[in-house]
Amino acid sequence: MISVEFRGFAWRHAGRLASAVADVDLRIEPGERVLLLGPSGSGKSTLLAALAGLLTTDSGEQTGAVLLDGADAADQRGRVGILFQDPETQLVMARSGDDVAFGLENQAVPPAQIWPRVDQALETVGFPYGRERGTDALSGGEQQRLALAGVLARRPDLILLDEPTANLDPEGAKAIREGLRTALADTEATLIVVEHRVADILDLVDRVIALGPGGALAADGTPEAVFGEHGDSLAAQGVWVPGAPLPVRPSGDAGEVRLRGEGLTLAYPGADRSALDGVDLELRAGELLAVTGPNGSGKSTLALLAGGLEKPTAGRARVPGERTGLHRLPAKRLATHVGTVFQDPEHQFVTATVRDELAFAPRAAGWESERIEARVSELLERLRLDRLAGANPHTLSGGEARRLSVAGALAAAPGTLILDEPTFGQDRRTWGELVDLIADIRDDGTALMAVTHDRDFAAALAGRELALDQGKATEEATRC
Ligand SMILES: Nc1ncnc2c1ncn2[C@@H]1O[C@H](COP(=O)(O)OP(=O)(O)OP(=O)(O)O)[C@@H](O)[C@H]1O
Ligand SMILES: Nc1ncnc2c1ncn2[C@@H]1O[C@H](COP(=O)(O)OP(=O)(O)OP(=O)(O)O)[C@@H](O)[C@H]1O
């Protein structure tokens, strides 16, 4: 139990002209459960980082104060547990159990209590393996569960969760919310949770705080009051307001087959079963295939194989006109056929600015400079990245980075595009802009595959759906 206070707080990240957040005056009482929302890039993660004492003088410039129980947050780190947006950055140990135990050992929890607490936390989050599982052998959703277990096991006074269910399948997300509810019922911890898709999280919180586009406070109150009184203005700023209708962009008839996967199988070294097991796949011009299924069912593995980035243990992925499997093609040649957007955008960036990142693929494809410039300007504007054109891709917010990685991969209009969780971390407005952009390139004749937990995205764009479970297709890809 701990109180939280921002007094005249502003933060400007090093290398940026504008403040990420400004004029924040806010008090959260001990034990309050708060949902923090706001458009992509409005400063939500920055506020959490401030509370966790992670904003250091060499990383930017602070005005005002951030206080926990009246003391500087930088001196209270032991009382705070934070779940980052990208769970991979959080996992430090080689074995899953050790990773959860690590924080407890640091807090000098008596040894006899450590393993029972580790096991309890793993159970709370529905981690499907034992303590021995290697942390480098986890799917995105499994990493997120493990990272959350690490936070909960420490029983911090202040729990900060940055999009805790964004990588989870709908069933898993529900289970995590139940787990959180149980874990919270036993504590008096203060909770601040950031989510874009708020509908499901509302009954976990008693207060909603909304940031506006410039990082200033836009609304503060009970969920009913905030969405009742400010629903329209929040929606206008791009926030997901529960119940608002969503666009649908149905496709026309699918064209020729652009990429075919036959019996695609991958067994990771040392695993007891294949992560992907004999999956057939057909991607057609002008159509988007949604690949769905629970965490760990093999979706990202399928994306790697279809993108030619891994060698299948059996089966192969091929494009018409090439005699060998995709994974055997030299990188440059592969790039002329297929573009891939990974689950974790950070792995993708190869240049020093947002503008160069967007120009990279068109340049490699030999476009003329005027055409490149026009394409880059169009994408910057469509995805609301213009103000960040000169920024380093690695300093973007989670949602900004996701948009850049998708835009970078489709910039040169490859014939086939493989997207792993393209809508991760988006507010309602940027979600709609991404959907429109992807619909346009689909309708221009691109063949698309999208791994996604986002049912709204699949409903808006997919012509067919391929559902995986434990590495196998549950049925033939069905028409949506
Ligand atoms: N390390 C950094 N260096 C420079 N600028 C940064 C850094 N981290 C974030 N920013 C910028 O600060 C602003 C706020 O980012 P923040 O991550 O707090 O937003 P957010 O509300 O959490 O966004 P999202 O919903 O997209 O995750 C953004 O414009 C972002 O580009
Ligand atoms: N490098 C690896 N080594 C060993 N096993 C792995 C590795 N990467 C993933 N796995 C395992 O392979 C299976 C499929 O993982 P994959 O990442 O394809 O799942 P996913 O359906 O994309 O999951 P999510 O929805 O959580 O992202 C999981 O059981 C996972 O634990």
Image (cartoon, helix red, strand yellow):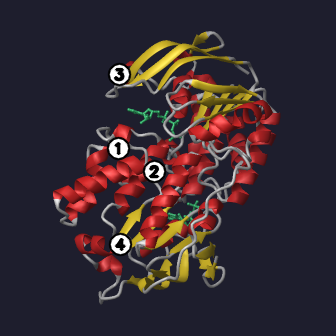
Label 3, label 2: how many angstroms apart (C-alpha)? 26 Å
Q: Which residue is mark 2?
A: 402
Q: Amino acid at mark 3?
A: Asp
Q: Is 139 located above or below residue 185 in the figure?
A: below
Label 1, label 3: how many angstroms apart (C-alpha)? 19 Å
The image shows residue 372 at horizontal and vertical percentages of 23, 57
Asked if the residue at tag 2 contacts the one at tag 3, i.e. Cβ–Cβ closer than 8 Å, the answer is no
- Residue neighbourhood size for the residue with mark 1, other residues' Cα within 10 Å, grouped as few (<14), some (14–19), many (≥20): many
Q: Which residue is mark 3?
A: 58
Q: Amino acid at mark 4?
A: Val
Q: How many marks?
A: 4
Q: Which mark is residue 338?
A: 4
- The earlier-in-sequence mark between 3 and 2 is 3
- Residue neighbourhood size for the residue with mark 4, other residues' Cα within 10 Å, grouped as few (<14), some (14–19), many (≥20): many
- Residue neighbourhood size for the residue with mark 2, other residues' Cα within 10 Å, grouped as few (<14), some (14–19), many (≥20): many
Q: Amino acid at mark 2?
A: Arg
